[in-house]
Image (tube, rainbow, N blue to C red):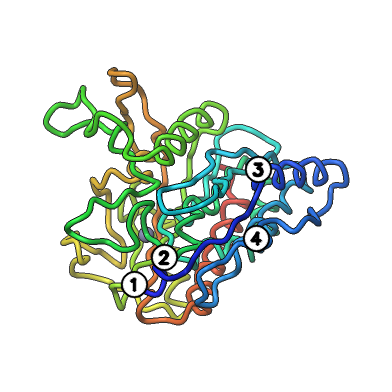
Amino acid sequence: MRPGHAIAVRAWPHATAFIWLALSIGQAAAAEPALPLGAGTATFADGRAPIDTLYRAYLQLLGVGWKLEIVAESKPAGTDHALPIIALRSPQSGPAVWILAGIHGEEPAGPNAIAAAIEDIAKLGEKRPVVLMPLLNPQGYARNWRYLNVATYTKEIDGQSVGDSSHLLPDAEEPGRARADSASSAEAAAITRFVLDLSAGYPPVYSLDHHEDNLIDEGYVYSQGTQGAGDPLAIEAVAVLRASGVPIKMGGKTRFGEDISGGIIGPVVDSSIDELMSSREIVLDGRLRPGPAAKTVLVFETPAAALTLEKRVAAHLALIRRLTGLLAAASE
Ligand SMILES: [Zn+2]
């Protein structure tokens, strides 16, 4: 058993009430909410920030006019209280940069780096529309559980990922049908529905998803968009990761047998939210419809077994700073 099993998540009563109170204060005073968000919630202790510290950092965006939505209240079996899955969006709508993190709860670097990069993300939001979903599996983060229903990947149990999009993605054999009849969890249903709904006003052009992998010694970048392994932002991401001291597997194959070229893997079929972001067609209510079709969809994988959390957070932070800087300066 991993240590995460033994960690009890203590009650955080009225999570939503705290958030909404913070929202109103944030809007009224245009300042960082001063409430003790999530106080008393135990977070897995490996050096990652306590979950209330993360929420407080993210909600600083309310002070510069961003809007908050509770995508879902996550309370999977075995937890005794709900934690909110939040999304924040910049004041200006239109073709947008989406930043995602924390889909897998045992991968803390992304959510921690986003908390440290809030000012950079706010600056990007001044230049172009941005949607931030910084902690998509809060219960997993608190417990160090990869999935909603199980702590780690196993062959025996089908792990429920909060990003599972198989109920919306066309089946290869029968493209008019989705790969699954229904979402694998309430969280996946709510998150994917939110992505599709908000895509009307904030269509994703760039989607950046921060992950890690504790079974590899060298990282890599998935590039699911139209330019695949040739996407200039993917190439830049590899350069930033290497400059941050992250070993990158530049060729050969991933542990899933996918080809790596220059540290980058082109489009893959994995039923993830990243595949959904890049998808030109989806199946909704039994019909094929246009998908989000983001031009650039990147997934960053840092090798959690090879580097300390501090170094991985620094690498993800460098990535966010570099990519938000480039996107703030770019015209499209
Ligand atoms: Zn992951």
> Which mark is first along the chain, 2 or 4?
4
Mark 2 and mark 1 in contact? Answer it, CB < 8 Å. Answer: yes
The answer to which of marks 1 and 3 sits earlier in the sequence is: 3
User: Helix, strand, or loop for circle 4?
Assistant: helix
Q: Which corner quadrant holds the C terminus? A: top right
Q: Which residue is mark 4?
A: 52
Viewed as shown, does residue 104 lie left or right of 141? Answer: left
Place of residue 255 in the rendered image (x, y in percent of width and height, measured from the top left):
20, 66
Provide the residue designation for mark 2: 106
Position of 191 compared to 286: left or right?
Answer: right
Marks 1 and 3, how far apart in space? 32 Å
Find the distance from the CA under tag 2 to the CA under tag 1: 9 Å
**Quick check: marks 4 and 2 in contact, CB under 8 Å?**
no
* Label 2 CA crowd tier, 10 Å (few <14, some 14–19, many 20+): many
Callout in the foreground (1, 4): 4
Which of 254 and 36 lies nearest the eye of the viewer?
A: 36
> Mark 4: which amino acid?
Asp
Would you name the residue on which mark 1 appears? 214
132 vs 136, left or right, is right
At x 52%, y 45%, the residue is: 98
Q: Which residue does the numbered mark 3 point to in the structure image?
A: 16
